[in-house]
Amino acid sequence: MEVLKIAIAGIAGVLFAVQLKSIRPEYSTYISLATCVILFYYGVSRLSVIVDTLNSIQSYIKISDIYIAVLLKIIGITYIAEFSSALCKDAGYSAVAGQIEVFSKLVILAVSMPVLMALLETIDGLIG
């Protein structure tokens, strides 16, 4: 039912913004932004379920806390980058949205480097 509530809130915000677009285009942008922030808040509030599930998985199999932290950082970076990129595209600034996407990919790559190095060291230990 949560998804239905979010979908209805999103559609209502978009319809309201479309109605205002012909009268006051700047208000349309503000309504769109406010709708996105509300939806972002509800999305972030669901992250606790993901963290709890990852902790449960970690109790079954021995995964280092570092890997869980990296995974959570990557999820956060992806969510924030997608959110901000969509807002920029909606406002008509697709070039800025593209730069946000490129930067977020580079940050994800940088954050995941310790995991890649650990994997390479494990492979080297098995081969050598």
Image (tube, grey):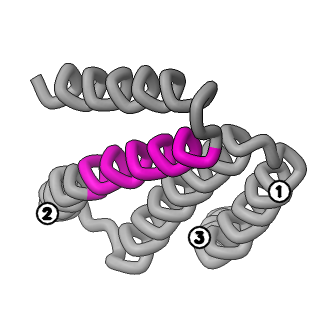
Q: Position of residue 32 (x, y in %)?
A: 49, 41
Q: Which mark is residue 96?
A: 1
> Residue 123, which numbered label?
none
Does residue 118 show up? no
Most common secondary structure along the magenta stretch: helix
From mark 1 to mark 3, how far is it between C-alphas? 30 Å
For residue 119, above or below residue 66: above
The foreground one among 2 and 120 is 2
- In the shown orientation, is residue 70 left or right of residue 86? left
Residue drawn at 40 percent across, 65 percent down: 72
At numbered mark 1, what does the secondary structure look like: helix, strand or loop?
Answer: helix
Residue 39, magenta (yes or no)? yes
Q: Quadrant of residue 61?
A: bottom left
Q: Nearer the viewer, residue 96 or 109?
A: 96
Q: Earlier in the sequence, mark 3 or mark 2?
A: 2
Q: Secondary structure at mark 2?
A: helix
Left/right placement of residue 15 relative to residue 118 reads: left
Quarter of the image where one finds residue 37: bottom left
At a point 70% along the width and 44% down the height, the residue shown is: 91
Q: Is residue 61 left or right of residue 127?
A: left
Residue identifier under label 3? 115
Element assignment for label 3:
helix
Which numbered disc flags the more N-terminal residue, 1 or 3? 1
Label 2 belongs to which residue? 59
Total labels drawn: 3
Task: Name the kind of residue labelled 3 in the image.
Answer: Val
The earlier-in-sequence mark between 2 and 1 is: 2
**128 versus 3 height, above or below:** below
